[in-house]
Every structure is written in structure tokens, then in C-alpha cells.
Amino acid sequence: MAGRERKSIPIGIDLGTSFCCVGAMCNGKVEIIPDLEGKRVTPSYVGFSKENRWLGEAARWQYFKNPKSTFFQVRRLIGRKFTDRGVTRDAQRWPFEVKEGQNGGVVLWADSVQKEFTPEEISAHLLAYMKEIAEKFLTTEDETPIIKDAVITVPAYFNDAQRQATKDAASIAGLNVLELMNEPTAAALVFAHEKVFRLGKRTVLVCDLGGTTFDVSVMTVEDFDFRVIAVGGDANLGGTDFDRRLIDYVSDEFERQVPGSNPRSTVKLRRNIREACIQAKIDLSQMHSTSILIQNGNDDFELNITRPKFEELNVDLFHKCIECVERALIDAQLTKEQVTDVVLVGGSSRIPYVQDLLEIFMGLKPFMCVHADEAVARGATIQASLRIAKVWESYKRRAELPRESIPVGIDLGTSFCCVGAMRNGDVQIVPNLVGRRITPSYVAFSETKVLVGEAAQSSYEKNPENCFFEVRRLIGRKFSDREVRMGARGWPFKLKEGPNGGVLLRANSLQKDFTPEEISAHLLTHMKEVAHKFFATEDGDRRPIVKDAVVTVPVYFNDAQRQATKDAAAMARLNVLELMLEPAAVALAFAFQEKFRAGKRTVLVCDLGRNTFDVSILRIEDFAFDVMAVGGDAQLGGADFDGRLIDYVSDKFDRQMPGSNPRSSVKLRRKIREACIQAKIDLSQMHSTNIMIEDGDDDFELTITRAMFEELNMDLFNKCIECIERVLSGAKLKKQAVTEVVLVGGSSRIPYVQRMVENFMGKKPLMWLHPDEAVARGAAIQASLRIAEVQESFKSDKPEESYKCDEEEVYKCDEQEEEAYKCDEVQGEVVGTDVVPFNICLHLNNGSMRGLIKKNSKRPAIGKCTLVASRDNQTSLLLPVYQGEGDFFVENVYLASFSVSGLEPAPRGHVKVEVTFRVDGNGILTATAVALRGHAPGRAMSVTVIAEAGMQSADCGICLRSGRVQQRRNREKEERAQVE
């Protein structure tokens, strides 16, 4: 490394008025880079206090506490004079002070630090942050790239002074500007990339409706060249204008219904109304009506908003958009009939009325495949690489995949869902209907509609008894399970016992019961619809079919839970290609990203999610990977870290505000929970943050430091290391044998977790897999491999080789027994194997366990043993099946029982029964028993083993603890043997 020249990677930056976004080319593909909170778009906010400087989401959150020193929408000021009409108009709306600077320019006054900043300096903070997150994302153990060259986008209406000021801001941030690119042109370049395989000359209209501006461009595309004919738009028209109309309407209604409240003069009320209206606008993109709930001391104000009402409030602004389109067409000297394609991007393009209005006017359905918030950054990234590396040929050579049927990968998570698919040889994580790549695992019911995702989550506060979440904890379980009883105490919805002892969830609004499988089916259906809409084309009969899916499940899921997941998918009309273990999915995503690195590699994958911590070890060589061991803790995750902080803050609140009793007040509990979750996010970037809780006319404020948060959760963090140690022991590996450590899952962003894993393993964890999307990425790759559509994208330059798994040792019950398990030969360039997470055993009548399939055996797996009748004239055998690692049944978890009947009476020891266990690729266990008389086979019985009581998370802990006990016993035996 000492004498090695560092690689320079150009980046593309969308320096937006409302949001920023950065991308880079990785292995010939555009990668939009998540910020330090894991979000691909970062709010264009910069805040200051005496101790800290905040950027992005953290600054936006601080705005409510420190509005006079938090700056946003600064792009409206860059390169302008203080006397400009737009500056004076905007300054009246902003809480921070805008003053006249040198040469008639603009300066912004930060009250908390008593200092002036130019718009260029504020913009430089944002650009430096984009540069920083790109450097962190692109840095590997082998290489730290240089990030200095960038293409930065600007609105089409920017004049020379504004463009030069943007370049000055980039210079302050240490960036060399390769090009200032018009935003519609950047979107056009993305369109050329997406449509590059369609032949003939095309005339394209690109509409970018963002937070504060509406940009329009007309361009032609022929073969691989594009030319912008005309640009236009409105610099004072965007999503914030739509928000403002709704805010004014709600404020008027509030004042009318709550006399004397004066919401426009109360900072708290203004903020609450603004946040509620922005959320309502998002909700109305998915449903026809929503409720706005505003808290005002001890009183609540509620107002129902319908989609037609929102459209009525903004109809003149929507029609202004069409006027802008008309003017751009006139400037291009074109009629609308001459336009062959319409592209619609920008956050506000998700408003259904905007889509419908544009479609009616143009007579063409707008093309919406490009992610609305990322399109401009994607175009800038492509242009940056074109300017530096001339990579356009890599786009020309790509072969378009057939789109008649698109297999998808779905991460059906406890807290969030995510869906992806292979597209043009790369994984595309599909944004949902509100533009987010992860969808909350919420389903809600009213008398007239079913809500899924964000809409359901936002309805929780108003309708908690009919809003279901964390349902994955219930799927495939019995009502009597400990996990069900524990969860029921914390959930607002009601559970009851259903047929065969199962679980039912009661929706009071419908007076109807739902199974966990039915709720999960709603989530899977939503993911399917999201993918279908995203990949839909307007080419007549070539609309894609989304029917095949790889669905991921946790390591600890037993047979009943796996089968129930398949049942939910069947209800959603999905064909499950495979149920894939979540850590194995991460492993495959890693193998895909790392496919250009040679040699044998041993990789530790740690997935620290909201509710669980999964650990896996895999081997990668050439283009094959093997899962060696899996483990973790089914009751350890981000929710536990939140809980510690929530308890601490609740105690402080109770102490400082006597009589408040925060744990018994639903509103206070919710406020404390939200504030603590945000504080945890802030502490990933800062060393301290403030928690502010409103309680009527009083405010509670508390400073939380990163060290304090770490102290509250230290024992939980140490549990993570214990899990890793156990998995290494299970794989019979020393930590020095691990070549790479991959860290994913939302809670992996906690700095202490990263440091702790690095200190223990002796190497820096790789974090370039997006923590929230890694599982879905792996599932999407596996789905395409199973359908065999994209094998070519994985090929190396080496001759094709086949891959054989090692022969796996199994528990043998008879010396004459044949070898029980051997992997089949697998053809292909990328090969992956999952493993069985626990021993599968039979309980014998002496209380001991007879193991048939060993923990960490590769799937599919087979185990056999021969049992002998223990009584004279015995005509049947009862065979209890357990999973776990203990020597005795009380140390393991019961799954089910099956019997072998019809045995011919014979003396004890004469009749033998051969039992075979098979675990298929989805982890479903099937047991077969064959009665033997001498050498003549008798009658065979085969059953699928479905657990009679779903494995509880606590039972998962029993399995893991029994394994640790067994390891300790084995060590003691070895020590005694050495002494003897």
C-alpha cells in the first residue's frame, strides 16, 4: 500500500434545494450512496450550536429546537443579491435571519454561534458531507480512493452568477467540478441509459417536479446520442407550494374549530401542523383520504382530508405545470404529438393528479421507472464517469433482460420489507409508491380500505387496535407459545386462539379475525404490486409478470414458520422459488459485489437488525460460496437499544416532572419513543444530542451523549460479541482465519458496534452493502439464479467449471449404515449453499437424543438411523422429533411426533425400522420410516414434520444454550482424557 497510487473515483452530486444525493460508478454500474443514516437522499439542512454542527437529517431534526441557527433551501440564495425580489420574499418565510453582505450579496446569521455565513459556505458544508459519505462508502480494506472530481447539477434557470457561486462552494469543499450539469439534462441522460436498447429516433419530454422548482426539458435520442432542444419551467413551483396550500387550509380550520388558538403565531403548533400536512400529502399518494391529527396540549384536533380536496386546493398550481410544458414545447417548435416519450421525476411527481394531468395533456403515460429522488444524481454520476473514464461503451454492450417475467427477491422483515430484482445485470432495489426503498411492515384496516406500509404506519396513532405490525413474530406459531404471550402484552391489537391452537388477530373495525399468514400476504402482495408497477413498460403486450420470488426468513425459523411463510406467499399469488436464510442472502450479495476479487476468502457476516442479530460464516472461492455456520440471538436488536434509552429518558422525565407518569400516557410514551429513536440516529453522527418532549404547556429537555448511550447498552453490545464467538466455535475457526467482516442491518450504523467488532476481529468491517437492503439484494440475485435469466452476468474469464460441495459428516446410528449425505454436483458460475441451523434429533425412550442431521449441515441434507423394537410383539413406534444440541430431550425444543404402525408382531429386537430425515432447500423437514424384516422392506410412511408449537425466540435461546452446555461437556471430557 505504501507505494501504491490511490485510485481517483469521480462522483455525481445532486445539490438540491430540499435534498442532496450522491452517486458513483461501481463495477460499471451506478451506485447511489447512502448517507451516514443509511438514506439515499439527505435533507439539505445545516445547523449550528455552540458545541455541534449538524448536517442532513440530524440538522432537520434540530430545526425544531434551534430554528434561528438551522439553514435550509439555501440554493435559493446562492449567487443572488440581497435586493433580489426572490430573496426578500423567501426571507419572510424563513426563521433564520438573512442580511445584506459585501457587494450587496447575501449572508445568513447563525444566532447560536453569533456568526455570519454566505450561501456558498453553507452549500460547501453539504458538498463536503456528500464527499465524506462517498469516501466512507467506497473505502475498502485494500484501498482508500481519492474523491475530488464531481459533476454537480444545477437548475436549468441558474444564471452565470449562480453557477459560479456553486463552483465556489465546491472549491471550498475540496471538489474539482468536472461540469455543472442542468438537472433535466441529467435526468435525460438516465433516460437514455434506461431506453438505450430501443431503436430509432425518439423525442423525449422530461419533467422534474421537485420540492421548490419545476424544470422541463425537451430532447432527442437517437442510437446512443442525445441532444437537448429546449429547457424551461418555474423556479417558484414545487412540492413546498402544495404543502403550503394544505397547511394554510388546515390552519384556518384549526383556528375555526379551536377559538383563540392562533396556530400561525405558535411555533409548536406551526411545526405540528406542517409535519402532519406533509405526511398527509404522502398518504394521499396511496389512498383517497387520510386524517390529520394535531396535538394541542390536552386537546386533539382532527380533520379528514380527501384526495379531491387536496387537488382542489392546488388545482391552479397543477395547471401551471402544464403551462410550463406548453411553453417548453413552443420553444422547441414541437407539437405534443411529436413527443414519443414522457419522463416524470422529482419527489412531487408521485402525486397522482400530476401524473394523470400530464398523461391527459400529452396523450402518453409518463415513464416513471427512474427513481424519482435519485434520477438527477444518477445522470450526474454517469456524466462524471463519461468525463473521466469514457464508460459509455459499457452501457452499449449490455443485453436487456426479458421482461415478460421478472423474478424478485423479497425481504419480509419484522420491521420493514424490501423488494428487488435483477435489471441489466445489476440488482435494482425497487422504491415503493412513496419513493422509499424499505416499507414498514404495517397493515391497517378501516371499514372501507386496507392500508399497507407508510400509510398504515401513519394511521397507527389514530387507529392502534386495527393496525398490525411485527406480525412475523406470530407467523407459524401457536397461541400458547411464550413469544406470543410476551408480544401480546406490548401490542395494542388483540390476539385470540384460532383453530388448531393457532393465532388470530382481531380487526375491530371490520369485526373480523385474520391469521398472521393473511396479514403477511397483504405485505407480500404490496411488494409484488410495487415491483410490477416499477417494471411496467408501455410497450403493449410486454408488461412484466411478477409471480416468482425468493423470500427470506430468519435463521431461527422452524418448519412450521417456514411453511406458514410459503402459505402467505401463496395467498399473495407468488410462487416461492426458495425460502432463503437472511444471512445467506447477505452472503450472496457480498459474493456478487466481490466477484472480481480472486482467491479463497472466509467471510463473517453480522446482521444486526431491529429485533434480531444473525451471524453467519461463509467461504468464497472463485464464484462459489459455502455457508459454514450460522447463529445469533433472536431477541437482540435495535429495539432493545431503543428500549434502554426510552426507559432512561422516562425515568428522568418522571423525576423532573412529578405527576406526569409518562409510562401510563399513550401520547407521552409515543413522544418519548420517537424522540429516543431519533436521538439514537443523531448519535451515529454526533457525540451528543438533545431530546425535547412537549407535555402540554411545559417542555422537557435532556442532553444525551454517545458515551451515555453506549453505557446504557454495554451488556447488549457485549452479547453481540458472544454470539460471534459461538459461531466461530461452531465453524471450528479462529478469528484470525476470517479474511473479511461484513456488517449489515439498520443497527450496524451504531459507531460502538462497528468499533467493537473491529477490535474483536482485528479488521475493519466492510460497510458498503446498504444495511437495510443487503438481504433483499441477495434474495434478488438468488431469484434470478433460480430462474436462470442472468447467469452471464456472473461469468468470469476462466473456463467453465463445476462445483462440488465437500462430503458432510453425519450422525451414524449403525456401523453398517451407508453414508447419509452427499451434496449433488452443481453447475453454474455462482453457487450458494444454506445450512441447517440446529441439530435434528429423535427422542429415544431412555431419554437420550439420537441425532440424524447435524447443525450447519448444508441443505439439502439427509440423515438416517435404524431403530429396533424395544418390546416383544410391538406393533407401532412413536417418534418424537426435536431440534437442539443437548444430550437429553429436556435440553432441546420439541417439534412434532409421528408414528409408524402396522408392524408385524415379533420378539424384541427382531423388527427394525429405518428412519430418514430430509431437509430440502427451503429448510422444510420430511421424515420417512420404513419397517424392515430381515432384508425384505416393509411398509413405508412419509410425513412432513410441522412443529406442533412454533419455535419461540426463547426456545431458540434454549437451542443455543444447550449447544453451549454440550460444548462445555465435550471440553471437560477432553480435559479428563488428557489427565488420565
Image (cartoon, rainbow, N blue to C red):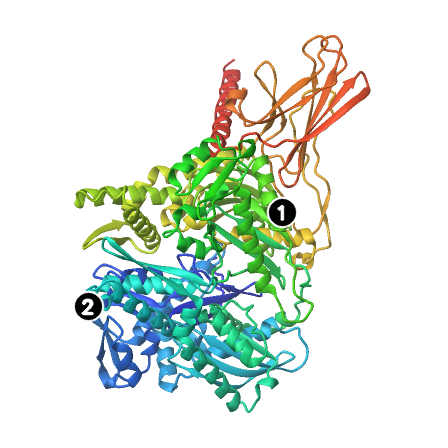
- Label 2 – label 1 distance at C-alpha: 59 Å
The residue drawn where x is 41% and y is 74% is 312
Mark 2: secondary structure: loop
For disc 1, the neighbor class at 10 Å (few under 14, some 14 to 19, many from 20) is some
Q: Height in image: 959 above or below 666?
A: above
> In which quarter of the view is residue 155 placed?
bottom left
The one of 685 and 265 positioned closer to us in this rendering: 265
Which mark is drawn over residue 570?
1
Kind of residue indicated by mark 1: Ala
Which mark is drawn over residue 111?
2
Residue 875 percent coordinates (x, y):
72, 14
Query: Total number of numbered labels?
Result: 2
Which mark is drawn over residue 154?
none
Residue 382 percent coordinates (x, y):
53, 72
Residue 123 percent coordinates (x, y):
34, 72
Residue 137 percent coordinates (x, y):
45, 59
Outermost residue, right side: 936
Q: Give the left or right position of residue 629, taking residue 113 as reference.
A: right
The one of 744 and 693 positioned closer to us in this rendering: 693
> In which quarter of the view is residue 642 placed?
top left
Tell which circle, 2 or 1, labels the residue nearer the N-terminal end: 2
Kind of residue indicated by mark 2: Asp
For disc 2, the neighbor class at 10 Å (few under 14, some 14 to 19, many from 20) is some
Mark 1: secondary structure: helix
Q: Height in image: 909 above or below 166?
A: above
The residue drawn where x is 70% and y is 19% is 814
> In which quarter of the view is residue 18 placed?
bottom left
The answer to whether residue 427 is seen in the rendering is no
Q: Give the left or right position of residue 165, taking residue 199 as reference.
A: left
Q: Give the left or right position of residue 620, taking residue 742 as reference.
A: right
Q: Height in image: 784 above or below 583?
A: below
Residues at badges 2 and 1 in contact (C-beta under 8 Å)? Answer: no
